[in-house]
Amino acid sequence: MLELEQVSKWFGLTQALDAVTLSVVPCQTTVLIGPSGCGKSTLLRIMIGLIDPDGGTVQFEGTTISPEIINELRHKMGYVIQEGGLFPHLTAQANITVMARQLGWPEDRMRDRLANLVTLTRFPSDGLDRFPAQLSGGQRQRVSLMRALMLDPDLLLLDEPLGALDPMIRTELQDDLQSIFRELGKTVVLVTHDLAEADFLGDTILLMNEGVIVQQGTIQQMLGAPADPFVRRFIEAQRRPISSTDPIQ
């Protein structure tokens, strides 16, 4: 589905990605995880063509991504950014159907697709006429997901979609995302900083640090045979329970 070969990216004097090579397997969920600033969100934005790499190539379904064709290719990609990125002046329904309307879909096709997505995401149908500010955080993320799925894309890219939610809503949405991924059989690339979320949703986990992929596989494989001391430190730091006597940072 996606092939990245020796992809590098610099922001000024800072190297965000250092010759990253990876293949994204179709019909599976690939999770990018790592500490803040490791390059995972930059890598996702390069996958969808929002930023260009300074070196290397990116292929989507065998086609090299370039500025000349990226708009056409994006119709086959769904993208959910951090905190949803909804248009505040549009209702939930208008947010979801904005691209379909721009592409000239007939009203009955949009209506049928919208009804399917509302059922799939368990979104309350009476919320479709509300504006984002009138929705809960979890509802806004469901709207963002429906917007990303509206055109029935081959690839779904999610950049920390649940990071701003409280723990109870986040757990509920994790369950729903897992169910949706399985039902649709989509190819998914998910960025998260949460190890438990990566383990729960991912078929393959790519652990990044300082612009490179340090190791990929399952959490169990990484713990059993860490490729680098950083791997064990990162996993154990997230798994370690916080003592009630620890000072608040």
Image (cartoon, grey):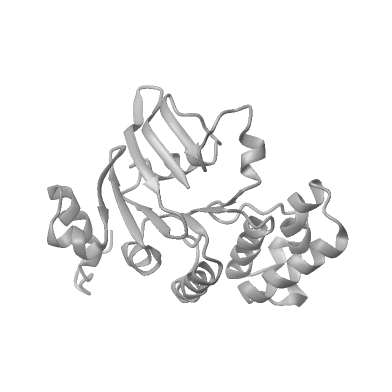
Q: Nearer the viewer, residue 125 or 104?
A: 104
Residue depicted at 63% across the width and 69% down the height: 139
Dividing the picture into quadrants, the one containing residue 122 is bottom right
Q: Name the side, left or right, on which 87 lies relative to 14.
A: right
Q: Name the side, left or right, on which 188 lies relative to 152.
A: left
Q: Is residue 160 visible?
A: no
Vertical position of residue 3 compared to residue 97: above or below: above
Vertical position of residue 23 compared to residue 234: above or below: above
Residue depicted at 33% across the width and 67% down the height: 196
Residue 194 lies, in percent from the top left, at 35, 61
Dividing the picture into quadrants, the one containing residue 71 is top right
Q: Name the side, left or right, on which 186 lies relative to 239.
A: right
Q: Is residue 232 visible?
A: yes
Residue depicted at 27% across the width and 57% down the height: 217
Residue 178 lies, in percent from the top left, at 47, 71
Q: Name the side, left or right, on which 247 lies relative to 106.
A: left
Residue 149 lies, in percent from the top left, at 63, 59
Q: Which of 51 and 30 is in front in this view?
A: 30
Residue 114 lies, in percent from the top left, at 74, 67
Q: Outermost residue toward the right?
A: 107
Vertical position of residue 11 compared to residue 128: above or below: above
Q: Quadrant of the C terminus?
A: bottom left
Dividing the picture into quadrants, the one containing residue 18 is top left
Count of all numbered marks drawn on residues in the image: 0
Residue depicted at 72% across the width and 59% down the height: 96
